[in-house]
Image (cartoon, helix red, strand yellow):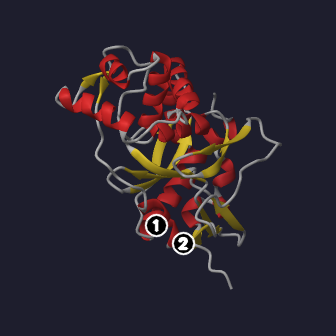
Amino acid sequence: MRVPHRHVVADHLNGVKDPARWVLIGIEAADDLGMVRTGMTYDKDYGTSAGFFEKPQRLQFFEGPNEPAVADHLEMSPRYLDFQFQPLRLTFRRADGRVIHKYPDVGIEYDDHSVRFGEIKSDDAWFQAAGIRRPLERIDMAMSASGMDTLLRIKGTVFRRDEVQKAHGIAMEARLTTFDPSTDGGRARAAVMAAGGRARYADVVAALGGHRAHAVDKLYAMLMRRVVDFDLSSEPTADTLVTAPRPASAFALRELLARFQRKVA
């Protein structure tokens, strides 16, 4: 996807519209610590979509092809405990007095409970375009001044490769498969521990017993629930290594968003 000419040239950001002259008015999270806007518009040259995700336990709304691809990765990778699209509204006043709003694409809680917010674009060409780079630099300053890290620049093409989308698609279809945490989860983790903490995918599937296809689906569900961990940059093979992540429960992202929660009168 090519970067639109107006973002490359960015004459519209000169003079009174220069992001360097924006004054931060405030940062606001949603009442329910979810999305501050849906982003569902129908007058743009890219699609919009939505879906319910288990980790945030909320409906997530997306613009374009990159955001849903990143969301699938966040849902399935044990590295992430929670995420929220459209989590914050940053309000600025331009030099001409006009009030504008900016929205980081996503907030992410990692398995060490660190929290980062990020902007999602196709590739580096988008992030280097002046019409995108300059506003993001101003948002970075505002977030740093408010005690948060600068925005992650997340490149969606990494998650839109054919092999990644195929692997994620299979995993997402199977992620709600029911399994017994004690029996099935215990067998999977025991197989990993018996192999010294790094077991072959085929051996873990075999340890679950029963019909192989059902065991595979259970393992995908365990991946999302952080019972096991294995690579999804392509469809797993018999020799894909399976590990057991340390237990962790999400709290930090919603706790941080609560700092900016809109106060109800």
Q: Which residue is label 2 attached to?
A: 260
Front position in the image: 247 or 29: 247
Seen at 36% across and 57% down, the residue is: 113
Q: Residues within 10 Å of mark 2 (few under 14, many from 20)?
A: some
**Tag 2: residue type?**
Phe
**Secondary structure of residue under mark 1:** helix
**Secondary structure of residue under mark 2:** loop
Instruction: Residue lying at the far left in this picture: please name it.
Output: 196
Figure quadrant of the N terminus: top right
Seen at 64% across and 42% down, the residue is: 7
Position of 233 relative to 31 (above/below): above
Question: In the image, which disc is placed on residue 90?
Answer: none
Position of 104 relative to 93 (above/below): above
> Residue 189 sits in which quadrant?
top left
The x, y position of residue 58, in whole percent, is 62, 52
The x, y position of residue 63, in whole percent, is 68, 42
Q: Are marks 1 and 2 in contact (CB under 8 Å)?
A: yes
> Residue 212 sits in which quadrant?
top left
Distance from Cα at disc 1 to Cα at disc 2 = 8 Å
Seen at 63% across and 66% down, the residue is: 30
Image check: 79 left or right of 90?
Answer: left
Q: Residues within 10 Å of mark 1 (few under 14, many from 20)?
A: some
Seen at 71% across and 40% down, the residue is: 49
Front position in the image: 253 or 105: 253
Instruction: Residue lying at the far bottom in this picture: please name it.
Output: 265
**Tag 1: residue type?**
Leu
The x, y position of residue 222, in whole percent, is 42, 36
Figure quadrant of the C terminus: bottom right
Question: In the image, which disc is placed on residue 256?
Answer: 1
The x, y position of residue 87, in whole percent, is 58, 58
Image check: 91 left or right of 124?
Answer: right
Position of 150 relative to 237 (above/below): below
